[in-house]
Image: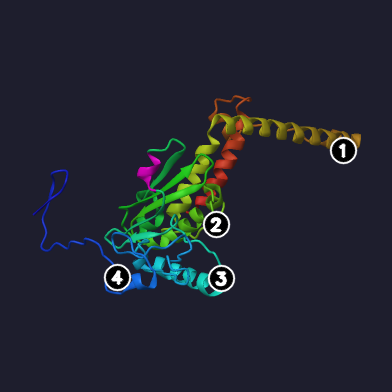
Amino acid sequence: MLVLENGSTVDFDQLLVSVGRVPRTPKLGLEKAGVALDERGYVRVDKHLRTTNASIWAAGDVTGHAQFTHTAGVNGSLAASNAILGLRRRVDTTTIPRVTFTQPKVAAVGLSTETAATRSELHVVSLDHEHLDRAIVESDVHGFTKLVVDDKGRILGATVVGPRAGETLGELTLAVRHGLRTRDIAGTTHACPTYNDGVWNASIEDVRSRLRTPTAVRALRVLSTTRRRWIGSSLKKGLDSQPDTLRSATPTTTAQPSASCQATGGSREAEPLAAVHAYLVGILGAVAGCR
């Protein structure tokens, strides 16, 4: 029986303990080549992956960077191009995708939700997979998608738990690396139903929340009022330019209150805002699709 930190217990048949890896560099004689090691035995490299010997570069687990196959591959290419072509490409240590192949899978990139909780300019957008169409179809709704977003809407980190979490992480890694905003993701059509819908719908929810701020509401009110007056003026000019015979034959209709007006208690002042807000939210809802 395994006793966890919180006092709860878990029964098990076998327990696998992973305590990490260490480099086997002591017997390589690197000091004779002028290649220094740190206190743990890792090869010391700079941001270009050059060692303390200006003619030698290093990449992979032996450098002490994140010990992932994909990191070793990317850094190996970077070190080779710097060494052979004389480039000065820098190693990226901030947007490394991390996937733990457990059940459910856990995938993350960039800043963690724990870090976001300590910084006032960051917030977390969360979508439980019980609202994700693909998860519902697969009868596996145990999971979530969380985005770490700054006050400008830029995605700085993400965590996905559930089936296909690793596959879902590709788009988020690209977003973090290139400073994409939730509006960029929300405005890009995604296939449905897929697990990647979690990223899409979480981004849409963040954009919607920004439309509900006082500043956005005031802007929508001004925009909708100006647009209504412009349309009204254009229609009036069009009618005034018609011959009298056509103008007299124009049927009159009684305006019916719109759904948005009814929803706001029939307030004409609230109708433009409600209409535009419903239109924008409707567009974003349509982007989410399949609902």
In the image, 41 versus 36, the foreground residue is 36
- Check disc 4 and report its element: helix, strand or loop: loop
Question: Could you tell me the amino acid type at mark 3?
Answer: Gly
The residue at the point 35 percent across, 43 percent down is 114
In the image, 120 versus 142, the foreground residue is 120
Which of disc 1 and disc 2 is earlier in sequence? 2
Residue 109: x and y in percent read 41, 55
On the image, numbered disc 1 is attached to which residue?
A: 246
Residue 5: x and y in percent read 16, 46
In magenta segment, residue 69? no
On the image, numbered disc 4 is attached to which residue?
A: 25
The residue carrying pointer 4 sits among few (fewer than 14), some (14 to 19) or many (20 or more) residues within 10 Å by Cα, namely: some
In the image, 257 versus 90, the foreground residue is 90
Cα separation, mark 3 vs mark 4, equals 27 Å
| Eye-nearest disc, 2 or 1 | 2
Which of disc 3 and disc 1 is earlier in sequence? 3
- Residue 75, compared with residue 243, is above or below; it is below
State the extent of the magenta-drawn residues as a range: 112-117
Which of disc 4 and disc 3 is earlier in sequence? 4
Cα separation, mark 4 vs mark 2, equals 49 Å
The residue at the point 46 percent across, 66 percent down is 50
Cα separation, mark 1 vs mark 3, equals 79 Å
On the image, numbered disc 2 is attached to which residue?
A: 189
The residue carrying pointer 2 sits among few (fewer than 14), some (14 to 19) or many (20 or more) residues within 10 Å by Cα, namely: few
Left or right: residue 130 compared with residue 218: left
On the image, numbered disc 3 is attached to which residue?
A: 86
**Residue farthest to the front?**
32
| Eye-nearest disc, 4 or 2 | 4
Checking the image for residue 257, the label placed there is none
- Magenta stretch, main secondary structure, is helix
Question: Could you tell me the amino acid type at mark 4?
Answer: Thr
The residue at the point 47 percent across, 69 percent down is 79
